[in-house]
Amino acid sequence: MKLTGKVAIVTGAASGMGKSIALLFASEGAKVVVSDLNVENASKVVEEIQANGGTALAVAANVAKEEDVQNLVDSTVAEYGTLDILVNNAGIMDNFVPAGDLTDELWDRVFAVNTTGPMRTIRKSLPIFLEKEGGVIVNIASAGGLNGSRAGAAYTAAKHAVVGLTKNVGFQYAVKNIRCNAIAPGAVATNIATSINAPNEFGMGRAMVGMGINPRTGTPEEIAKVALFLASDDSSFVNGTVVTADAGWTAY
Ligand code: NAD
């Protein structure tokens, strides 16, 4: 087992990649805090982990709310005494809205969840990592964090910001035995399409131009395996970088 005794928070863990990461980490011996907006579904993930003999706790948290982030980390420490691994997975799409059609509301909402959320969970976790002189952060960025038109302008800019945050934190805290890496998944079969409710015709059309060269859609379990690598000591020399997991889509 690769995470025996480790305490891990996974945000957005009620569905998709977050759920797969929570299940895999628990099966590798971690005590997992399954956090999500949707606490009912998060509780179902906890039940599944417990049924498999693992240890987990559900905590309701909207990562866009500072008080929820505070409560998430405080509840983790209250229950398990510490924190070793933070996985910033919660994220939403932006209806493929191009810059010309962007509203401030959409921009702010996408940044609040996809970028400010990870910044706040990192900010809240760092004092714990600094005190124990160790910690690992895994951010779920996106192929849209490295490339220009996998989504709309807000999602693309927000995920590029996550990549920048990952590199900054990874470098600055490297001397404190804290690692911070990101995963840039390509298209993965999850429930994220439910956050696309009114796709922008022009923006989606421009984003879809590249879909023809996508070798295939991935599974959440394939992303979870990359997250396990980055969260475990197997990746002890990997820091401040982005691992692309997209079957080669963005290599073209
Ligand atoms: P998903 O919709 O299946 O799961 C996302 C989970 O996040 C849901 O349970 C949802 O309730 C939760 N969530 C949404 N907003 C939240 C908030 N404000 N606070 C807390 N939880 C919140 O989607 P997924 O595809 O598994 O997405 C996980 C991550 O992967 C996201 O950051 C997404 O941007 C990224 N990603 C997805 C794809 C893809 O093709 N699915 C590709 C690249 C990157």
Image (tube, rainbow, N blue to C red):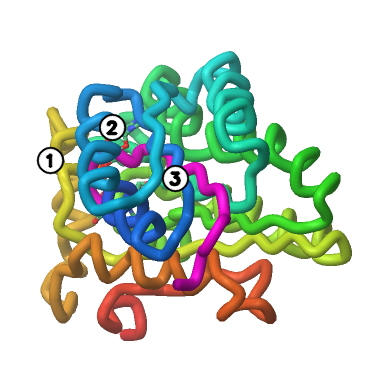
Mark 2 is on which residue type?
Ala
Q: Residue at x 37, y 29 (%)?
A: 58
Above or below, comparing residue 82 to residue 106 in the picture = below
Labels 2 and 3 touching (C-beta < 8 A): no
In the image, the segment drawn in magenta is: 1-16
Mark 1 is on which residue type?
Glu
- Kindly tell me whether mark 2's CB lies below 8 Å from ligand 1: yes
Category of crowding for the residue at label 2, using alpha-carbon neighbours closer than 10 angstroms: few (below 14), some (14–19), many (at least 20): many
Category of crowding for the residue at label 3, using alpha-carbon neighbours closer than 10 angstroms: few (below 14), some (14–19), many (at least 20): many
Name the residue nearer the viewer: 148 or 73: 73
Q: Quadrant of residue 90?
A: top left
Task: Identify the mark nearer the N-term, 2 or 3.
Answer: 3
Q: Dot 3: what SS?
A: strand
Q: Main secondary structure of the magenta part?
A: loop
Task: Identify the mark nearer the N-term, 1 or 3.
Answer: 3
Q: Position of residue 29 (x, y in %)?
A: 44, 60
Q: Position of residue 73 (x, y in %)?
A: 60, 30
Q: Residue at x 42, y 25 (%)?
A: 59
Q: How many marks?
A: 3
Q: Dot 1: what SS?
A: helix
**Does residue 87 appear to the left or right of 184 in the view shown?**
right
Q: Position of residue 184 (x, y in %)?
A: 41, 64
Residue 42, disc: 2
- What's the distance in space between the residues labelled 1 and 2, CA to CA? 33 Å
**Does residue 237 appear to the left or right of 60 in the view shown?**
right
What quarter of the picture does the C terminus occupy? Answer: bottom left
Judging by the rendered image, the residue that carries numbered circle 1 is: 201
Q: Nearer the viewer, mark 1 or mark 2?
A: 2
- What's the distance in space between the residues labelled 2 and 3, CA to CA? 11 Å
